[in-house]
Amino acid sequence: MAPQNPEERAVPAPSKDEVSRRGRSRVRWWIGGLLFASTIINYVDRQTLSALAPILKTEFHWTNSDFASLLISFRIAYTIMQGVGGRLFDVLGSRLGFAIVVSFYSLVAMTTAFARGIISFRIFRFLLGLGEGPNFPGAAKTVSEWFPNRERAWAVALFDSGTSIGGAVAPFIVLYAYKLSGTWRPAFVLTGCLGFIWLFVWLRYFRDPEDHPSATREELQYIRDGRAPDAAIPATPRWRDLIRYRQTWGIVLGRLLLDPYWFFVAEWFALYLSSKGFRLEQSILGFWMPFLGADLGNFAGGGLSSYWISRGWPVGKARRTVLLIFAPSMVSLLFVLHTSSYVAALFLFAYASFAYAACSTMFLSLPTDAFHSRAVGTVAGIGGTGAGIGTMISTYLIGRVTDVTSFAPVITAAAIVPCIATAVFVTLVRSSKRPDERGILRQF
C-alpha cells in the first residue's frame, strides 16, 4: 500500500559513486537562510512603528495608553492567526503558506504610510498582525521537515535570530528614511517592499525535501536518519486531539508567560529610554543593543543543546538544561532599577535578552521534537496563541502602569516571570512513559 504521508516515502541509499561525485548537499541550510531572511523582514515591518514611536507620539499627541492600543490591535490579530496560521501551514504546506502570508503583510506594511490618526493606525496594525501571525509556526514546521534532531535547535536559532537582526536594523533604516525625507511615511513604504523581494526568491527556490532538485539522496537520508521516526497517521491532527496532551499545555502556558518579555523590549524599549531622559537619537540608536544580545543568545542556546545531543544526551534533557541555566539569570535585569547610566542600562537589557533568546530557542524547538511533523505547525501556532494572549495582557498593563507610575514595576515583572515560565515548561513538556497510541507524540 502506498504511504499516506510524503515523509514516509522510501529514500534509496546513494551509491558510492554518487556519494563521491555529488557528496551530501546542504540545501537544508539554504532553506534555513530563507526562513532567517523572512523573520528579519517580518520584524523590520513590525518594528517600524516602535522605532518611530517617539516621533509619532509627539505628532499625534498620544499617551502611552494610546500607543498600547496600537500594539494590542496588532496583537489581537497576531494571536488569532498564530493558531489559524499554524493550521494553514499544516494543510497547505510551507511553500504556498509563506507565499500567501508574506505578500499580504508586505502590502499592509506599505499602505500604513497612508495612516492619518489613531483609528487608521489601529486598523493597519490589526491587518499587519493577521499577516505576520503565521510566520513562526510556519518556520517551525519547515524546520521539522528539513532538519535532523541534532541540527534542529541550530536551525531554530537561525530563523529566530532574525527577530533580533530585524529589530536591530529597523531603527537605522527608519531613522535614515525619516532624516532623508523629513517625514515618517516613506519608512513604511521602504520596509514593506522587502517582503516582495524575498517572495520572489522563495517561490523560485523552495520545494519540499523529497521534491527539491538540488537535494541529494544522501542529504535526504541524513535528514531521515537523524530524526525520530513519525508514525503513519492518516491526516493532520485536529486541535481537539492536540489539546489533550499536557505537552501542548506546557508549550502554551510557558510561552504565555515568557514571550511578553520580548515584546516589552521590542515595542517599548525606545519609549523606556526616552522616559529616562535620553535624546531621540540615543533612544533609537541604543535600541539595537538588546537585539544584539538576543541574537547571540539564540545561537548560545541552540549550540549548547546541539552539543549535548551530539554527546549522547536525550533531546528533551538537553533542551530543558538550557532553560534551567538561562531563565533564572534574567533576574539580573532588576539591577537596571538601581542605575542611571545609559551604558549600564543597555548592557543589562542586552544580557537579559541574551538569556531570554537562549530560552526562546528551546521553546520553539521542543514542539518540533515532541510532535509528529504533521502536527508541528498547529502546536506551534497554539503556543503562539498563548504567547499572544499573555502579550496582550502585558501590553495593556504596561500602558496603564507607565502612565500612572513608571517602568519600574514592569521591569520587575520582566525579570521574575520568565523563571515561572521555565518551571512550567520543564515540568510539562516531557516524553510520556508509554508510547502514544495515536502516533502524534514522539519519544524525545
Image (tube, rainbow, N blue to C red):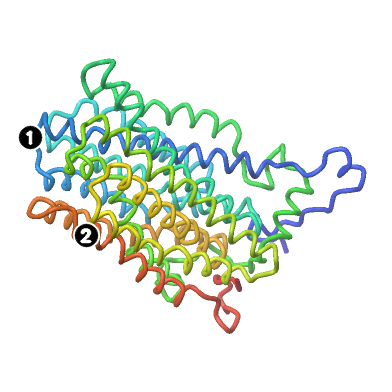
Q: Which mark is residue 393?
A: 2
Residues packed near mark 2 inside 10 Å, few (<14), some (14 to 19) or many (20 plus): some
Q: Secondary structure at mark 1?
A: loop
**Residue 71 in sight in this render:** yes
Residues packed near mark 1 inside 10 Å, few (<14), some (14 to 19) or many (20 plus): few
Where residue 250 sits, quadrant-wise, is bottom left
- Mark 2 or mark 1, which is nearer to you? 1
Please state the horizontal and vertical placement of residue 168, each as a whole percent of the image: 39, 37
Q: Secondary structure at mark 2?
A: helix
Q: State the residue lying farthest toward the bottom.
A: 433
Q: Residue at x 32, y 56 (%)?
A: 261
Q: Residue at x 38, y 67 (%)?
A: 254
Could you tell whether 73 is left or right of 210 in the image?
left
Image quarter where the N terminus lies is bottom right
**Residue 245 in sight in this render:** no
Q: Which mark is residue 345?
A: none
- Above or below residue 394? Residue 25 is above
Q: Which mark is residue 61?
A: 1
Q: State the residue lying farthest toward the top.
A: 181
Give 234 or 365, whichever is nearer the viewer: 365
Circles 2, 1 touching at the beta carbon (< 8 Å) = no
- Above or below residue 344? Residue 328 is below
Give 142 or 99, whichever is nearer the viewer: 142
Please state the horizontal and vertical placement of residue 15, each as a whole percent of the image: 90, 48
Given the image, on which type of amino acid does mark 2 rest? Ile
Where residue 257 sits, quadrant-wise, is bottom left
Q: Residue at x 32, y 57 (%)?
A: 333
Q: Residue at x 76, y 54 (%)?
A: 221
Could you tell whether 11 is left or right of 143 in the image?
right
Please state the horizontal and vertical placement of residue 203, each as a whole percent of the image: 55, 33
Image quarter where the C terminus lies is bottom right
In space, the residues marked 2 and 1 are separated at their CA atoms by: 24 Å
